[in-house]
Amino acid sequence: MSKDKLSVDPLNIVVCGVGGQGNILIARLAGRSLAKRGYIVTIGETYGASQRGGDVMSNIRLSVRHRYGPLIPPGGAHIVLGLEPLETLRILVDFGNPQVATITNTRPILPVTVGMGVTQYPDYDELRRAIAQLSRQVWFLDATEVALGLGSVRLTNMVMLGALVGSSLLPITKAQLEEEIKERFPKDTLKPILEAFRKGLSHTRATGCA
Amino acid sequence: MVALTANAAGKTELLIGNEAIARGALEAGVRVAASYPGTPSSEILENLAAVAEEAGLYAEWSVNEKVAVEVGAAASFAGLRAIVSFKHEGLNVALDTLCHLNLTGTKGGLVVVVCDDPGGWSSPSENDSRAIVQWLNVPLFEPSTPQEAKDMTRWAFELSEQTGTYCVMRSITRVSHTTGTVVLGEIASRDTPAHFDTSKLFVFVPIIKKHGNLLTKVEQVKEIFEKSQFNYYEGPEHPELVMISSGSGRLYSAEAVECLRLEKRVGIVHLGTTWPVPAKFVEKQLSQTSRVLVVEEVDPFVERNLKVVAADSGWLDRDHVIYGKASGHIKPVGELSPEIVINALARLTGIKHEPRSKEYDERAKQAAKDLVIDRELMWCPGCPHRATFWTIKNAFRLDGRDGFVSGDIGCYALDRRGAGGYLATKIALAMGSGAGVASGLGKLDQFGFSQPVIAVCGDSTFYHAAIPALINAKYNRSDVIMMILDNSATAMTGFQPHPGVGVNAMGKAAPVVDIEGLCRGLDIPVEVMDPFDITENTKRLVELMSDRSGARVVIMRHPCVLLRPPGEKTPFKVSVDISKCRGDECGCAKYCVRAFKCPGLVWDRTRGRAQIDEAVCVGCGVCTCTCPASAIMKEPSE
């Protein structure tokens, strides 16, 4: 175990998206790896009915001092990892602050009311501008496109997990997270998962924030 | 990751609360586990069932929570340790047995875990179980973290055996579904054989004596709780205010003190055992301050009990005050949050708290106003319930007598969600109540009631609580159409097996209890329909509604779409024929997307036409019947 002092303690991370996108898995993999390094980790999440197309979020809280509750207070996020841009903005509105760092997928998932013609999905450029204006630093990437390129939209969460590690905002390394992935998945399914993770990782590592 | 059964005492693991509870039971040498699924409780039994063979225990999904308690009690009577778990709604079902089991007493350690859902995230209520447990007069634990949940579970088995009563642990969503680091303990090896000692009686008579015994046990437990490690104080020596917390309130209180930098002024008492109240411990905590803020989930349960102790001890007067829900410092409905606790403490200490700059806050609010839209829950694309309710809605319209659905608990309750549902469901109470209410409505014709009613329930719900209601309708000659939405799954709670699916909780083959045969055995006419045969089903439903001939059952049978293996081809390829769809110019006002409300069929604003979202559509083909111009086409998948 080797834990470094955190730049802020507790370090609060929100992982958000739409039910079914796999945000819980991101939180578990990152959380488990951090717990192994000796950090006191708490993850709060809401599931149940959220599987049926609603918005979902996981709160990861990290400390070297003591245990924190499962909910991040309003305005208290340090990192927002968004699997869907509208959800990223929804979270920034509640949990953002002038210091927050944001990594977001740019591919929208339309709420059912949009398909019904009742509401309109926000204009993408405006959405992007609002996300940037509410963040100290921000990375945009089309993780869904990367995942589809690797054969399955279900890899989107692994691309985003890679992006989180590549941003260096968390005190975990590529090797540590890959070890976690290897423990979690059967060997014969690992190749595309690791590839998705590495693509996301090199995106944030190479591009820096916008 | 270390398996849940690894005997790795001292090792730290990241567990969700319900896994930690399962681990606590394994550490205590549990032998029998019984439950009925319900969020946020299901993972307790799921985790125990997954290791049943390896750990040498028996785990079952019981048909309902009352039977689950009886299965647990049986193990206890035979000298084994047992755990029974369910959500708060399940406690109501189990209550009839629990309120006699407290009198009969128990032998092997018996722990009942009830998972409350403050805020009703996944429930039809946010009822607080604790007042019921106080009324049952049995020991009550409230963990605040996964670690405490594990440790309390383990200890509750000891206490149960020591005192001869079952113990209740009240978890909540924010404990059961919170993941946290847990230091594991040793797994006890217990190989006591099951044996019922016939020289002992587990009966509730003589009643007065048994009631007296219960009160004696409670006094004994109270003494034990006075010294419990789960009740403690953290803070300065002379606090000007003490926060008394239970459950999730403990960490929210600590966060509020830290956030407002009140470490030198405010202390925190954590009460982990909340019934019977450890009065001496509480009195001691009260004596060090003149102001108390109680922080707990849902009802002012600890708050009221504290006031009793405070009044009895003479502490409570004009200068010694208990704040909380009654005083309005913490709202009396909904879930607690760090924000609520921070604001309450800020108000009581006169500190001004702003989590972020005004300028940022305004920018965020403006963005929300301009850009953020809601994301509503709804039935999945291809869900058989959507097809069933589409049929019901149309049958009511054709019938013309203002018919409605008497609903129940399951995914089909999404009919009540305005965005995705059809709002045919006008009544919804509890598991099995749809049929019971319909049975009552079916007897009101002599008073002039003439509206058709369809009772719906799911397959798992049917076994759980609807069967007695159906028998009631038969026996009392009530006109009831009971529709069983058989999707071969307990879908809402995560696909746990039930008596209709041929598998048990431990993944072994099990006999199928045939719903159709069961209804025929009651001499009730049964028809089985595929919900996707919209036209035929609508016609038949209209006929059934016009014929008032006692209890009848319709089984709408089609597997839940989420059970379809990934990669399996869809039944149909669905498309919109652009030459036929008249779009914005058609008089239908986007009928297909507006009225049918499937996420796979969307309005293309740029072309002003309907279109299939191929990434979402699963090819059920039901939407083809919604277009007045027959522009939506389906052809069998290749």
Image: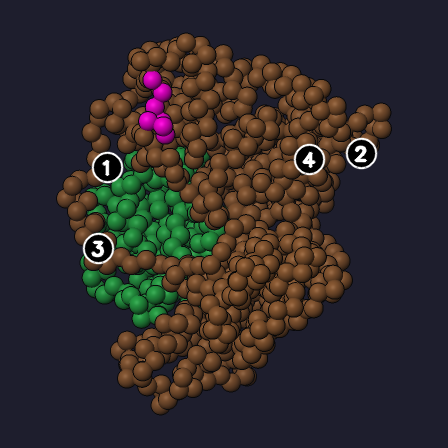
Chain colours: A green, B brown
Judging by the rendered image, the residue that carries numbered circle 1 is B355
Which x, y percent locates residue B256?
32, 29
Q: CA distance from mark 1 to mark 2?
A: 58 Å
Between marks 1 and 4 in the image, the one whose residue lies nearer the viewer: 4
Find residue B26 and report its horizontal and vertical position in percent. 65, 35
Residue range highlighted in magenta: B321-327
Residue B204 figure quarter:
top right
The residue that label 2 is drawn on is B194
Q: CA distance from mark 3 to mark 4?
A: 52 Å
x then y, percent, for residue B244? 40, 22
**10 Å crowding of disc 1: few (<14), some (14-19), many (20+):** some
Q: Disc 4 sits on a residue from what chain?
A: B
The reply to whether residue B186 is visible in this rendering is no
Q: Is residue B324 above or below residue B93?
A: above
Q: What kind of residue is marked 4?
A: Ala
Q: Is residue B279 visible?
A: yes
Q: Is residue B93 left or right of residue B411?
A: right
First-in-chain label (3 vs 4): 4
Q: Secondary structure at mark 3?
A: helix
Q: Which residue is mark 4?
A: B82
